[in-house]
Image (spheres, rainbow, N blue to C red):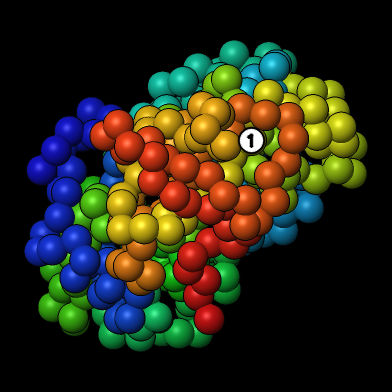
Amino acid sequence: MFPFAGWEVPLQYSSVKEEHLAVRHNVGIFDVSHMGQVFVSGNDALSYLQNLVPQDISKLVENKASYSMLVNEDGGIIDDLIIYRLKGRYLLIVNASRIQEDLSRLISMKNSYDVVIDNRSEELAMIAVQGPKASDLVEAIGISKTDHPERFSIKELNSVLIARTGYTGEDGFEIIVENKDAVDLWKKLVAHGAVPVGFAARDTLRLEASYLLYGQDMDEQTTPIEASLCWAIPRDKQADYAGKAIILNQMQTKNVKKKLVRFKMLDKSIPRHDYRIYIENQDMGKVTSGGFSPCTNTGIGLGFIDSKEPFAEGTKIDIMIRGKLHPAEIIGKPVYNRK
């Protein structure tokens, strides 16, 4: 166990590689109850959320989900989150380390909007079921496949919320239940063959899929464009939101101070957070996330390069590791894509 955002969480149950590959080839489960669950309802819920995030929530139909960010007036990312549209309300899944900052932002932006903000983070638990056999496992514990939501969707089944989302690059579900029901759900999943997975493998899984981690790969001093999240910023959204002019200007002009890139090592070294990135012997930035990829047997990472100029796929870079430069190259796609 180790401390994380005020929680004690498991680093690993067996070996990191075994847990990682179980998710890639079979099915693993994660206790992600540290994540925040905030419900927003009321007559003005839609217009209120439209004012908070760059994503166009007006296009979000019932039972669907959308990835977005809370942004400040400078376009900086307060948090990244998933917004689900339920019947008569919205559910925001936010990062544990940012719950208080998120709530402060939600409350400060409420103004005259007719909305109710209901933070249920202390009352609800969430278990992620991830892997190519996730659907079979969820069916085995009594949830018929006809009740399984589609990709990036959610369903309410009595007191259970089941979403087809995750943080691994695999198909899977995130099941939200009352705290009192969490242990029984976990035991039932394990009894039907699920492999418990800790936070170490969760990190290697998300890194292979190039999923960003708040506090490392993005923060309030980083805009979505700098974090290479252009795909989550619609150009045609009519509603205004904080930082909109700055974000759209950066998207159009590509005038940014830094840019997040993904890379792979060309030798057997492993990059880590805060290692420096060099290009042609010049210090050009730092690694934000790095580690070993069990699926490719190489070191991989994400990092910011301090330059307005884009760097193409295949650009050679070096990572300073214990006083020595190690070769790497920028890659265009994640090292792992689910088939």
Residue 325 visible? The answer is yes
Is 117 located above or below residue 16 in the figure?
A: above
Q: Is residue 52 above or below residue 170?
A: above
Front residue of 116 and 76: 76
Q: Is residue 192 above or below residue 97?
A: below
9 left or right of 319 in image: left
Can residue 143 be seen here? The reply is: no
- The type of residue carrying mark 1 is Lys
Residue 201 position by quadrant: bottom left
Which residue was labeled with disc 1? 259
Q: Is residue 292 left or right of residue 186?
A: right
- Residue located 44% across and 50% down the image: 327
- How far from the left and from the top, in percent, is residue 73? 70, 16
Q: Secondary structure at mark 1?
A: strand
Q: Quadrant of the N terminus?
A: top left
In-image side of 199 versus 255 (left or right): left
Q: Which residue is depicted at the point 15% across and 48% down?
A: 10
Q: Position of residue 60 (x, y in %)?
A: 72, 54
**Residue 323 position within the rendered picture, expressed as x and y whole percent measured from the top left:** 30, 31
Which quadrant of the figure has residue 124? top left
Q: How many marks?
A: 1
Q: Residue at x 52, y 71 (%)?
A: 337
Residue 199, horizontal then vertical, whole percent: 25, 50
Q: Residues within 10 Å of mark 1 (few under 14, many from 20)?
A: many
The residue sitting at 72% across, 41% down in the picture is 310
Q: Quadrant of the rendered structure where residue 95 is?
A: top left
Q: In the rendered view, does 285 fall on the left or right side of 162?
A: right
20 w.r.t. 231: above or below: below
